[in-house]
Image (cartoon, rainbow, N blue to C red):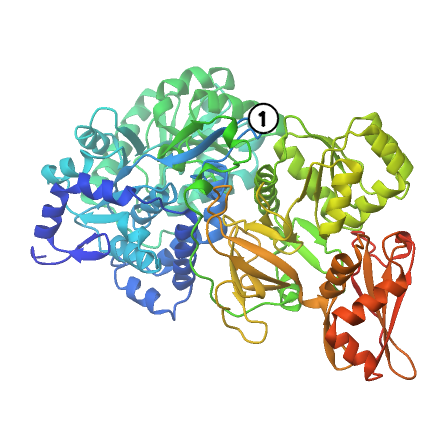
Amino acid sequence: MTESVQHHYWQGAFVDDEEAGRRLAGLPATVEAALAEPLDTETVLAACEQLAAALRDPAHPTHARLAKHLAEGEDTAVLTELAAFLSRPELTTKLRRELGGTSPQRLNRPDAKETVYEAWAPVGLVAHIAPGNAATVAPLSLVEGLLAGNVNVLKTSSADTLLAQHLLAELAALDPTGAIAERVIVLRFSSSRQDWLSLMCAPADAVAVWGGESAVEGVAAHVPSGCRLVEWGHKISFAYLTRDAWQDPAALAALATDVCLHEQQACSSPQVVYLDTEDPAEVFAFAERFAAVLGGMPPAEREDTTPAEEAELTTTELIARLEEHLDLTRVIAAPDGSWRVMADIRPALTASPLHRSVWVKPLPRKNLLGTLRPMRRYLQTAGIAGSRTDIAELSRLALAAGATRVTPLGRMLGGYSGEPHDGVYALQRYSRRVAVQADERFATTACLDDLTRPVSFPPPTGPLLDKAAVQELNENVDRRDAELYFRSGGSTGKPALSLFTYDDYDTQMRAAARGLLAAGYDPARDRTANLFYCGGMYGGFISFFSILERLGGTQLPMAAGPDHRVTAEALVAHEADTLFGMPSYLWQLLHEQADLLRSYGGIRKIFYGGEHFTAEQRRTLTETFGIETIRSITYGSTDLGPLGYQCTESTGGVHHLHADLHTMEILDTEADRPVPPGETGRLVFSTHARRGQNLGRYVIGDLGRALPGPCACGNRSPRFELLGRGGDVMRVAAYFLNYRRFVAIAEQDCGYRGELQVLLARTEVREQLTVRVEATDTAGPRELRAAFLAGYEELRSAVDDRLLDLVVETADGADFARTATSGKLRVVVDGRQG
């Protein structure tokens, strides 16, 4: 390969040796420039998911391009293996296990009662020294560096193909922001180029090296003082069998599978089989039996041993045969040399020459710790077989001796999503735990990053989804991702089912908790009665129980009950000063028990959800009951979870977007195009922080508008104002009438501050619209009817044209139609048939 060949990938472009050398000299400045802007984890997840989809599809052009760079003899199963690692479920599980969440670099409050912020920050520059002939290790190590937010420079062997370079180039090309490309440098050169190795490691904050002791020592010489050296060295694994287990044919078959899988080339492959005995005769007898099982395994697909490996195999077997004359060993080997079992009565851990070569040794459990602990630096997996009690005891001993993994036989080379590697989490090795202490001015700031920049997600794409489409998607959700079932309140139609993983639920509850802090909730002082409805798979009460639990707030988990007197007495007895609940329920509770609750005078805050208080209702709560804070507890849906939250500067329907969970579009009500800034349209949300479901471009049914300019609270998250639901608009007698116009007229023209419900019916003559209100001293049915006709031109025209009968009636609040599960007021009840 000539010097002009461009076999290095540097921040979005392929370059030759001369250019790579020139750029290496300026690597420190390159790193500083790249770190100036943070890398959102979602940017990496989105690009990896797209690349994984391409790698799974043999017909995709990316699959074909990368297949050209596979080593001779490798098949496309390597690409499938890469796709599995790069999938969103795999990476989100990894992030949650290793760094606690899918947005680990955001400065959040680990204890909501303190204004202390913590996050996982990138170390800066990670230099990855990849091993030769391991196609997947190099790119996946760099992806781990990206997940931690680092700039990464990767060295691949000069004998390797350009798979890593081209795979990471494809990944960077899938990021429209260019942030990934800024953090990816892949160089292909021989370890003999010590000047390049030195230039690569000198500005590094962490150096990850894969290989044996000699490889690690060679790199360590270039690692500067204070730089973190992350060793992913060669390890030795062993099997340990109790007496009952070594007599079990199934255990021997499982052990043989572990030996033959990958021809012992994995660090987790067993090299030594220990028996819980001191009797040499039992060791030799087992070796004979196991040799018969090993000899019956399918042959290796291909023999690719090097001359040096052949020499080691021959030498090891020859020495073991010579020691047979001293009654120390016994060797049973295949005539063609394809496998060998070497029994040795000395228990010391001995490395195998691999390629289906296994030592069998005695090691009574009383000596296990003393025998293996001197080799603790090299131990990895212990495959243990025995009774349940044996496995529990031996696992503790193996771990104390230095092993980092314990598995059953037959699964030594397996793993699970998010599993630590060699006793550590890689992402934590590529990160720093950082903290910021703040004063009382930050009491309502849940995330420090919100004061500087919102999370930036890639623009949503794909078709729009309505509730029916989401319900159809639910039918195909993997059962493993359907751990938690909720039903919607059904206030706008038939209750719908929503499915969550517990991880997704936890992410959403923590986001909602941060929103509640922004709204002025004080977990250190507020005493909260959770009065949301419970039961029937409705998530209101349960969700807010979870939110308060994560905040560490004092909670009275009472739920909405029919006996308002009992509820009020409990509030007084336990000195509750903060109420969580639905506006309609809280309104009834406060008015029915007005004397008791006013005389108590302890209710200071109300956080409501699911419905809205009108301006007049807020005024009444403030003037009559002395409520100081009345804010939305969250804006959300059962399907998507929390969507928006109020801050201390928000009023009415104004909310900040949960920008770390969703992106928001506002589309025209008649066409699928964005509305001009500030105009009213349909709210469309795409959620990104979900492992179990991909809910993109969900038309939730609400109307709203974006609010320009920064919020006075300092939060940079986008703001929007809710302006009702699409279902609030009714087609009646050839006119479109809006429920909210009725509420506004009643409130503004007549001072009405109770609940209001519209009933639609069809009589023999014409349609009928009934406005149901509560009996108040501010306005009766006659005054309200006159105000509606005077203030609503379309309504007056329908009545004047004898197309519609308008009725206004009073009713007790308990008689209003409500949803059975959530207790929400059904604002429009359409009883028309046909």
Q: Quadrant of residue 244?
A: top right
Q: Judge by depth and name the residue closer to the eye, 124 or 674.
A: 674
Q: Is residue 821 above or below residue 227?
A: below
Whether residue 412 can be seen here? yes
Tell me the quadrant of the picture where the C terminus can be found: bottom right
* Residue 11 at x, y percent in the picture: 23, 52
* Residue 121 at x, y percent in the picture: 38, 35
Name which residue type carries label 1: Ala
* Residue 78 at x, y percent in the picture: 36, 56
Q: Residue at x 41, y 60 (%)?
A: 50
Q: Residue at x 48, y 18 (%)?
A: 278
Q: Judge by depth and name the residue closer to the eye, 741 or 426.
A: 741
Side (left or right) of 366 relative to 581: left
Q: Which residue is mark 1?
A: 392
Q: Is residue 297 above or below residue 628?
A: below
Tell me the quadrant of the picture where the N terminus can be found: bottom left
Whether residue 417 can be seen here? no
The tally of labels here is 1
Side (left or right) of 100 relative to 328: right
* Residue 418 at x, y percent in the picture: 48, 41
Side (left or right) of 806 relative to 605: right
* Label 1: which secondary element: helix
Q: How many other residues sit within 10 Å of disc 1, few (<14), some (14-19) or many (≥20)?
A: few
